[in-house]
Image: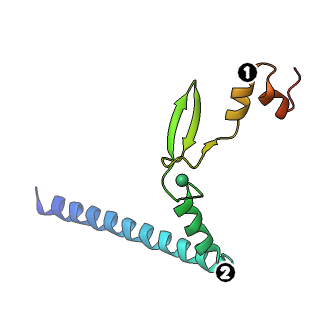
Amino acid sequence: MSDGEKDRFGDKLREVEKAREDKFFADRDRELLLKLKSPPGAQEEQSVRDLAKMRCPKCGDRLMTLTRLEVDLDECPNGHGVWLDTGELEKLSAREGSGWLSRILGRPS
Ligand SMILES: [Zn+2]
């Protein structure tokens, strides 16, 4: 590699480094602005939401996702309950025909 090539290579490396720095500071500024704009308590609220995601509301243990008959169930490993995602109950009801589940969901029998 000639000296000229080395200089150009060095310049390119510095440009890449500068671009990375610019992105880092732009990302950090964006985060800081978001924090300043968010109402008081919003961060704590988000932290609680993140911690509670996919956890049992009674014991706090992680829910296990099981698929039974093509329906996804989120179940507490300690037996406190089973949760269904939006639409899963309707899936069950559609299979059931004209039983009690369909009547609860208001489907014509
Ligand atoms: Zn539980």
Question: Hey, which quadrant is residue 83 in on the image?
Answer: top right
Instruction: Check disc 1 and report its element: helix, strand or loop.
Output: helix
Mark 1: give few (<14), some (14-19) or many (20+) Cα within 10 Å: few
- Nearest the viewer among 27 and 83 is 83
Which residue is found at the position 53% from the left and 59% from the top? Answer: 59
**What type is the residue that disc 1 sits on?**
Glu
Q: Nearer the viewer, residue 58 or 87?
A: 58
Q: In this view, does 8 lie above or below 107?
A: below
Residue at 67% of width from left, 34% of height from top?
88
Q: How many marks can you see?
A: 2
Circle 1 is placed at which residue position? Answer: 96
Does the image show residue 54? no
Q: Is mark 2 within 8 Å of ligand 1?
A: no
Q: In which quarter of the image is residue 102?
A: top right
Query: Looking at the image, which residue sits at the far front?
Result: 79
Picture quadrant where residue 37 is located: bottom right
* Relative to 90, residue 35 above or below: below
Q: Where is residue 3 in the image (x, y as percent from the top left)?
A: 12, 63
Q: Which amino acid does label 2 sit on?
A: Pro
Q: Quadrant of the C terminus?
A: top right
